[in-house]
Amino acid sequence: MNAKELRAAFVEFFAERGHSKVDSSSLIPHDNTLLFTNAGMVPFKTFFVGDETPPYDRAVSIQKCVRAGGIHNDLDEVGRTTRHLTFFEMMGNFSFGDYFKSDAIPFAWEFVTGVLKLDVDRLWVTVHLTDDEAEAIWRDDVGVSPDRIQRLDEDNWWRMADTGPNGPCSEIFYDLGAEYGDDGGPAHGGEDRFIEIWNLVFMQFDQQADGEQIPLPKPSIDTGAGLERILCVLQGVDSVFGTDEF
Ligand code: SER
């Protein structure tokens, strides 16, 4: 698959599952907590926190992103790793109080293994330390081997900025192979070896400036799959700069 085909496959997969297609927003967000749009969920923030009523319960988008400040700053990594970029595209499916973990997790697995046909033997998942429910879904509903599921703390809690929507998350990793670093999965192995390709955020809180965590009106889903990283895996190249996009 080239980039154009991957974008189309992603959008169609989620459109077939009831998601409204939404165009990428500007890189300049309507949000004074961010300098640039840093994730696919940014244009939907007001829907998650309940300030606005969304015109749809489910959405799919491919959002232009820059991570150049605040709590998500990739710039110091660019040129030092094979997977960080100044600008990237994030493919995402979103639920605004509609479905939650028990649908979001199987959707991601079906796309990764059924549509992209990534080798299951190379996939690992992580869940938050506290998230027994997500682990059970991966293990019992999806059928991921328990020894491929690891628990992490802060790495499995996603927040947009110092304030705003946040929640525990679960990530899918692809093992590039022994030549790229130590074994041990994403929790213990080499970080150039186990490459994060998809993040499923179980949005539940809206962090206030004083530190208080207000529950969101409804638990929601924010996912993000890095277009360039998935292309890397699909095209068998070991750097995002080797994909057809570049
Ligand atoms: N917002 C999450 C992230 O950027 C999932 O899309 O990783």
Image (tube, helix red, strand yellow):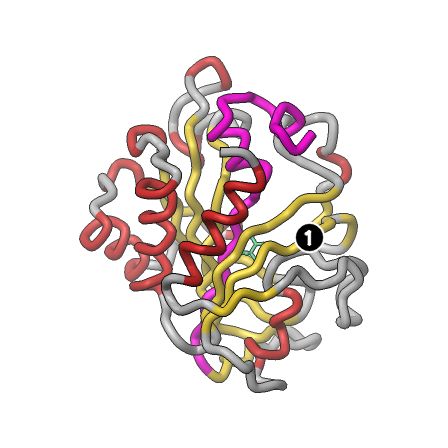
Q: Nearer the viewer, residue 72 or 244?
A: 244
User: In percent of the image, x 49 and y 25: which residue is there?
Assistant: 193
151 w.r.t. 235: above or below: below
Q: Name the image quarter holding the C terminus.
A: top right
Task: From the image, tell me which residue sits under label 1.
Answer: 64
Q: What's under tag 1, amino acid-wise?
A: Lys
Where is residue 219, by image quadrant? Answer: bottom left
Q: Nearer the viewer, residue 32 or 24?
A: 24
116 w.r.t. 133: above or below: above
Q: Is residue 14 magenta?
A: no
Q: Position of residue 78 (x, y in %)?
A: 73, 32
Q: Nearer the viewer, residue 7 or 223?
A: 7
User: In percent of the image, x 38 and y 62: which residue is there?
Assistant: 16
Q: Nearer the viewer, residue 202 or 40?
A: 40
211 w.r.t. 83: above or below: below
User: In percent of the image, x 76 and y 39: which residue is there?
Assistant: 75
21 w.r.t. 3: above or below: below
Q: Is 8 situated left or right of 137 in this image?
A: right
Q: Position of residue 12 (x, y in %)?
A: 44, 55
Q: Is residue 219 magenta?
A: yes
Quadrant where ligand 1 appears: bottom right
User: In percent of the image, x 37 and y 47: which residue is there?
Assistant: 111
Q: Secondary structure at mark 1?
A: strand
Q: Position of residue 187 (x, y in %)?
A: 43, 37
Tell me which segment is drawn in magenta: 218-246
The local crowd at label 1, few if under 14, some if 14 to 19, many if 20 or more residues have their Cα within 10 Å, is many
Q: Is 196 situated left or right of 35 in this image?
A: left
